[in-house]
Image (spheres, rainbow, N blue to C red):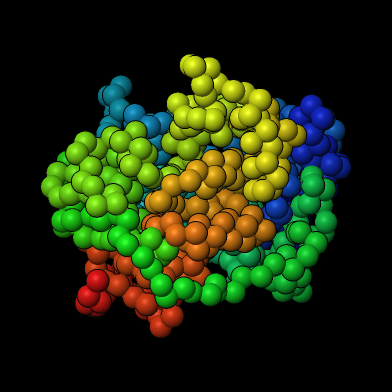
Amino acid sequence: MTFAIEMTGVTKRFGAVVANRNVSFGVRQGEIHALVGENGAGKTTLMNVLFGLVQPDEGTIRINGQTVVMDSPRRAIALGLGMVHQHFKLVPSLTVAENIFLGMEIVRGGLIDRKAQSEKTRQISAEFGLKVDPDRRVSELSVGIEQRVEILKVLARGAKIVILDEPTAVLTPQESRELFRILRRFADAGMTVIFISHHLSEVMEVSDTVTVLRDGAVVGTRPTRELNEDELVRMMVGRNVNFDRRPRKAISGRTVIELKEICARDARGVLALRDVNLTVRSGEIVGIVGVDGNGQTELAEVIAGLRAPSHGEIAVNGITIAESHPRAMREAGLAHVPADRLARGVDASASISANILMGRQYAQPWAGRGLIRWGRVREFARGLIKRFDIRARNEKTLVKTLSGGNMQKVVVAREFSRETPFLLVDQPTRGVDIGAMERIHDEIMLKRDQGAAILLISVQIDEVLALADRILVMFAGRISGEVDPEKTTEDEIGLLMAGGAERPRAAA
Ligand SMILES: Nc1ncnc2c1ncn2[C@@H]1O[C@H](COP(=O)(O)OP(=O)(O)OP(=O)(O)O)[C@@H](O)[C@H]1O
Ligand SMILES: [Mg+2]
């Protein structure tokens, strides 16, 4: 079999950081090749080199046997490559169809034929089993739907070699399965697929070959069938990682947050939440699951004070919140890990310290007499870098130079280090590696044991099953069922998420 891609001796440095160290990486035509490794191992950098976004310091690239100088993404695209980026590159002010046809617009009589573009988008959306509404503006989409648009955009361009950098981080297990079915069909037809993922079960299930990176270097390339998940973990991190369900605590205390008959409209004015009633008590983790687009985004926004409800009430510690505003919610005691770290979680152009300070800048002991006490902030940031294992040179490192998973850790570290009675965590482990996931899960349990009320929203059902004391299923803007994590299965939850038989909620 021929190699579609051969990267030889690739080294890439960013100042003192060696992101890729003499990497040799070969992908056969027609295979699905998984690229795995811890946060900061160099996966995205290697793919950016392949796609012409980053120029290597050393090394060569051959595509279908031909040596090429990959000096721009344009050249990569011309050679048949397509890339789905870890951080989305869609234009927020354009519609889904306009994004998909960006640069290859359907033109009629000198004008863009929007109707044809929408129609074509609908077709490919159906063909690839990734549901999107062609005429919605990207700025109104949830991260899961944005991910679908990113994937469709690349597939629609007819790429022969497709790179997907963590395409499933915000997809539900069902959506991921559907995506992999499509990729398999493509690979069978001769297309070459590289995908990056921290979900090792998915890697085991879907890939033909796995390459493991560690600290920028290749640990090995092996046929998937010769590996098991434990071996893969050892190759990645050099130790075993434990994923058992956590012990549950039956005792929960007073009600910390209460939503009464909340209704809210989405960005287009369509009713997205319908009479949502919800309480989270001190010392409990309530999990919310649902297929993206069933109201979870709006629910999180309402609780975070980012979206005003059209009806209903929110109370924190028994006090009704009069005005819906992020600062009002924070002052009432909310800590919030948002689903979209780059849009809402961090200021990427600022340092880790400055990001850790966000939300604390008015408070003792970080500020006094109108001045920020940077010495204290930096010392505190150094402690968090250690505690959350953020892979960075130091606390002055700019967040935009961190790997995706390490950016996520910065947001989690900032929010979890606040002494608040209530945490809203939306996809808390998005894009983090298994070691970091274990760490974040430990921190969530610790918060619960200290008496925090936690609302956990996640498309990763296994994560919710492992952590939550109660699980609520959302469907069509309502809470359509409640299940006991001790007694349910992923399949049962999957059925409820798809709008299957409603299950009465246990009396609260
Ligand atoms: N533009 C940049 N400037 C400085 N350092 C960078 C830059 N881009 C990446 N790095 C560093 O290179 C290393 C590899 O990062 P990369 O994003 O490739 O990791 P990754 O394997 O994709 O991790 P993740 O799983 O978290 O996405 C990290 O130490 C990162 O901080
Ligand atoms: Mg990455």
Residue that appears at 86% across and 42% down: 22
Q: Please, which residue is most extreme toward the top here?
A: 370
**255 displayed left or right of 130:** left
**202 displayed left or right of 490:** right
Q: Please, which residue is most extreme toward the left here?
A: 311
Q: Quadrant of residue 105?
A: top left
Residue that appears at 70% across and 52% down: 38
**433 displayed left or right of 28:** left
Counting labels gives 0
- The N terminus appears in which quarter of the rendering? bottom right
Residue that appears at 66% across and 70% down: 242
Residue that appears at 34% across and 75% down: 483
Percent across and percent down for residue 71 are 70, 27
In front here: 474 or 86?
Answer: 474
Res 382 seen here: yes
Asked if residue 436 is positioned above or below residue 205 in the image, the reply reads above
Percent across and percent down for residue 237 are 76, 59
Q: Please, which residue is most extreme toward the bottom here?
A: 487
In front here: 288 or 178?
Answer: 288
In front here: 61 or 473?
Answer: 473
Percent across and percent down for residue 64 are 73, 47
Asked if residue 251 is positioned above or below residue 299 in the image, the reply reads below
